[in-house]
Image (tube, coloured by chain):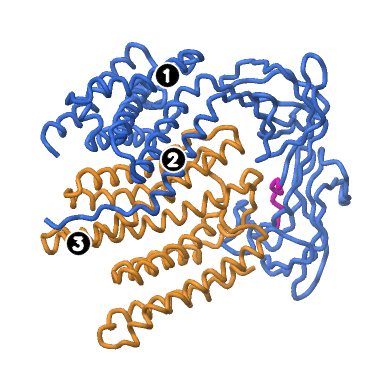
Amino acid sequence: MNKGKFKFSVIIPIFILITGLCLHFTQGLIRPEWFSFPVNLIIGLELFCGIPLVYFFFKNKKAVQFLSSGAAAISAISLFAFLTTIMAVLPQEKPSYSFIEFSGLNNIVFTWYFTLSALYILICLGFVILRRFNAFSLRNIVFFINHFGLWLVIVTGFLGQADKIKLNIPVAEGSLVWYGFDPDNKYFEPGFAIKLTDFKIEYYNPKIGVFNSDGELTGKTREALSEIKQKDKIKAGNYDVEILEILQYASVSGDSVYAVTENRGAVTAVRLKLSDDKNSFEKWIYTGNKMVKPGIIATGTENFIALIPPEPKYFGSDIEFYTRSGISAEPHNISVNKPLKYYSWTIYQSSYYSDPESGNIISVFSAVYDPWLPFTYAGMFMLISGAVFMMFTKIRTVKKD
Amino acid sequence: MIWSRLDIIFVVFIVSWLSGSISLIFDKKSAFLKKYSSIIPALANVSLILFISVLWTQLERPPIKTMAETRLWYAMFVSLITWIIYLRTKVKTLYFLGFIMSSVFITVDLIHPEYQSKNLMPALQSPWFIPHVVIYMIAYAVLAAACLTAVTGLVNTKRTGIADSKNIDLSMKLVYPGFGLLSTGMVLGAVWAKIAWGNYWTWDPKETWALLTWLFYLICIHLHFSFPKKHKLLLILLAFSFIVLIITWLGIRYLPGGMSGMHVYGQ
């Protein structure tokens, strides 16, 4: 690397860091709403048109030549990697040291120095793409797809954040809800309502664990935490344990356990047959809830068998959308990994919880409005196509000194 | 459950690779030993592939969710890819180091059986899950081979005082497809996250470290492209990039804030 290039590749990142810190100390963190439509569109177009204009008018200037060089690329990526390293090492949450908060190191994504570092990458990417436009070859096409894809992802990913709306919409069974809350817990009306007609949940079979008197799983045995099926046999202490019956929803009253159809207030119960050298007996174990203490079986002075609450296998909701003018479509089913498109919104099954007061299940939806997504996806698609080409690229080999 | 037979696979794996490695040391003396060392890793790989297939059938889902399961794939891919590369390049170091790495992964699974049984939570039940993880696993294995080649190159460069261009070339030949796979895995993960949670990128610790790994290999590629004579710097950077990759894969939970985010499950 010649000395001039080396000097630039060190000075520019330092300049960006100092400028970014000065802006941070005077202006504070960047707020995404500053870039709300149409500001983001104007900035996007300015970058899209401005970079080529600067390049074509000043391509013979040293600064532009440097910014389209490999040295600049390494310098820009290194600066971005340096800031990403801080982000990776320092938890991005409320810090215990005020200095970290003061310098924005706990919120790097919204700092000026991070944004300027991304801008440095965008300018280098833009210039190098334009420089490689000089000849039409397969190599240059792959280069363009890769680099422009990345450019598009960074620009639309950053600017698109400002227009993105994500709402949390908790809905109780039978209720109709017109509003949601954004990540800052601000009230927002998306212009439609969700009615939850039914919430369905399925569980995996429960797991049995053998615990010691401190309530810890014993040893690293294969039996510990194994998912059980009817007729399964496991070893617990001196006992051979056979699984006789599994009740996904059960009710416990005194010593009797019986199956119920409603999951509200139910526990999961398993009937076991325990045998040792001398005797054999049957007993229920069950998970607990607010009303029922967990049912366990002591298998010795030190150990006991207990049931671990089953994990959900599936949960989903039957919903109807309402607009101000009335019901707008037939009922829909929505579950995890199967979101639903409703005009410009996408609705996700996010989670569920049991209302502490009524015991009713509340289904939580996320409604996302993300108008810049198609452009980000286009960038990702280009990046991935370039990556596939790259796997088959013949690389330049090292010449011996 | 086939997990209880992992010890047999372990023995088959160790015996076949170890005998292959020993044969490789003396391969100049005997044509048979040369042939044996080239072919015997197939037995190790077939046994591991069979184990994974049976496990897949028994679990009734792809075994790519817990650390124990991903280690199996990693062992299989590292073993398979380093063996194939050895057959093409005849770099013996790669043969030994690939074998050691794979054995370590199987050994960890053997002594930590408590990570073997865990259900698939709803968010992981997605057609994007398999390509996302498997492509990452292949990328990690290819980049592990690139790292081993770079370390061999560094040792040779230090010993002879001349840049080991053969190993730089080989390492970079692995980095390009490895980086392509890394990018593909990352984009597939982003698309899946968008479908499952509504965000394609949330800066959770795993994502941040995955991006960092990607950036380090991006620097390696640009350094190799723009400054092909910076041999030593490139070799050191290649080795260091793999350390970042290992932290991304295994080390995040030991870092402050590492147990938060959407990638924490299956433990």
Instruction: Please name the residue that numbered disc 1 is placed on.
Output: A45
Chain coloured blue: which letter? A
The CA distance from mark 3 to mark 2 is 35 Å
Residue at 82%, 34% in the rendered image = A198
Q: Nearer the viewer, mark 1 or mark 3?
A: 1
Instruction: Please name the residue that numbered disc 3 is placed on.
Output: B155
Which chain is indicated by disc 1? Answer: A
Which chain is indicated by disc 2? Answer: A
Q: Is residue A255 above or below residue A59?
A: below
Q: Is residue A98 above or below residue B223?
A: above
Q: Residues within 10 Å of mark 1 (few under 14, many from 20)?
A: few
**Is there any visible trace of residue A164 in the rendered image?**
yes
Secondary structure under the numbered disc 2 in the rendered image: helix
Instruction: Please name the residue that numbered disc 2 is placed on.
Output: A383
Q: Is residue A289 above or below residue A190?
A: below
Q: Which image quarter holds the N terminus of chain B?
A: bottom right
Q: Residues within 10 Å of mark 3 (few under 14, many from 20)?
A: few
Is the residue at mark 1 from the same chain as the one at mark 3? no
Q: Which residues are magenta?
A: A305-313
**Image quadrant where residue B226 sits:** top left
Type of amino acid at the residue the image marks with label 3: Val
Residue B186 placement (x, y as % from top left): 47, 43
Secondary structure under the numbered disc 1 in the rendered image: helix
Which chain is indicated by disc 3? Answer: B
**Is there any visible trace of residue B246 in the rendered image?**
no
- On screen, residue A182 versus residue A377, left or right, reads right
Residue A260 placement (x, y as % from top left): 88, 46
**Residue B110 inside the magenta-drawn segment:** no
Residue at 32%, 67% in the rendered image = B94
Residue at 18%, 23% in the rendered image = A61
The rendered magenta stretch, by its main secondary structure, is classed as: strand
